[in-house]
Amino acid sequence: MDGNLLGLALPIGLGMAAIGSGLGLGKAIEGGMNAMGRQPEAIGQIQTAMIIGCAFIEALTIYALVATLMLMGKL
Amino acid sequence: MFDMSRNKLTILAIAFGALLFAAGMSGTPAMAQHDTHGEAAHAEGADQHADQHAEEQAGDHAEGHAEGHDEGHDDHLPNLLTYVSVVTPDSVDNILVEWNNPIFAFIVIILTAIFFISLSKDLNSRKPSRKQMVAELIIGYLYDLFTQIIGPTARRYTPFLGSLFLFILLNNLFGLVPLGHASTSAFNTTTFALGLITFFFVQTVALKENGLLGYLHHMAGSPKTGMDWGFSLLLFPLHLLGELIKPVSLALRLFGNIFGEEALVATMVGLGILITHAFVDASLMPGIPLQFPFYFLGLLSSTIQALVFTLLATVYIALWLPHVDHDEQHGH
């Protein structure tokens, strides 16, 4: 019974995390692209800042993935 | 000249594609055995049994070394050591499988060291050789990257951050090489160690640049007025916690990405084998290379993750540096 519930919960949780960070990444990259279009000479700096921001956003999904991988043994 | 280099590029690209293809195929036979072995329990279609003991052993080892998971699902393709451990006696097998990640990290370290030592052998600032140009290109890129974030003092930290970048990048890419294995796909042997190293480096830099009092002042949230001092009691534990969590988050991010990528490739290899075995009843039949497109994803994420780890380490250093540097940088 417990295993069955986990089997349902893990993918749903991971999917929810992915939805959130997908929306966040979309917004971040939208802002980055706008900035790059407006100021093409600052592309290098904007890109660096954007990648760092993306990493922070993406980390949340990765935490969910790590939790999933850890709990997968209990299925 | 451009045409010539373009031809070379084409050849390089084809060779690289073949290499990637071989990478997937090299894992196929052992995976095939392992797959049918596992599937036989609950699928009625797959009734082939592993007839070669050696191959089965290889598959089991691939299962056994899965980092920290007792249940052992297919996380990685079998690598060089998995095949070597088939030949060697049992006592050596365990060592090989347990020390899988450090061994591959050492292989990468030795190869990198040989490469860069040979690059830096005879340096000449008047007439740089081709090798020197390559080395200067890499170092120059890294130096520019760190200067963007830290400012003019970045040269001091480039040796550490640059080696971090190269180590992670090459380790990640080594997972895509046939019979290779990305040692960064293990949390407690590689990525956590990298996080720890970064933690100690950042703290050392912080203590050196700020002094002990400045360090504590920064930890308390740089209080100025009386009210700030009141809040510093609240902020100090928060900052302390933040410092401790940063390296763990770095390590988890790298581990999760690379592990996920390797697991994806392994799953796709297994799927390809499952599909061929539905049509052809032969245990050594290679699978459809479904994993092929994911190698390109792997190339992309390997590079980005190495960059992200290094950039975040740079940012953590930049956060600790005295703020005078920043004003100087924005001044002009």
Image (tube, coloured by chain):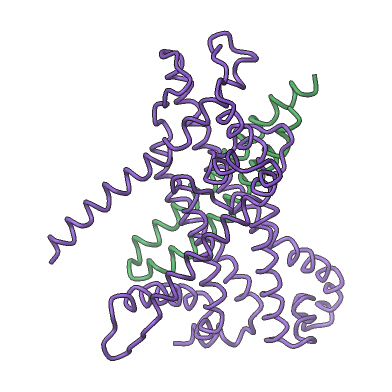
Instruction: Give me the residue at 64% from left, 84% from top.
Output: B322
Residue B36 against residue B60 in the figure, above or below: above
Question: Which residue is at a point 74% across and 79% down the rendered structure image?
Answer: B218
Task: Count the numbered circles shown.
Answer: 0
In front of the other: B59 or B11: B59
Q: Could you say which quadrant of the image residue B21 lies in?
A: top left
Q: Which chain can be seen in purple? A: B
* Image quadrant in which the N terminus of chain B is located: bottom left
Return the residue found at the far bottom.
B126
Please give the name of the residue rendered at 68% of the width and 55% of the height, measured from the top-left corner. B189
Q: Nearer the viewer, residue B77 or A25?
A: B77
User: In terms of image quadrants, where is residue B104?
Assistant: bottom right
Furthest-top residue in this view: B44
**Place of residue B188 in the rendered image (x, y in percent of width and height, measured from the top left):** 70, 53
Q: Position of residue A52 (x, y in %)?
A: 53, 61
Quadrant of the image containing the C terminus of chain B: bottom left
Quadrant in the picture for residue B68: top right
For chain A, what colour was chosen? green
Counting from the top left corner in percent of width and height, residue A53 is at 54, 58
Residue at 48% in and 53% down: B174
**Where in the figure is residue B204, as x and y percent of width and height?**
70, 79
Q: Is A25 placed left or right of B234 in the picture?
A: left
Residue nearer the viewer, B229 or A14: A14
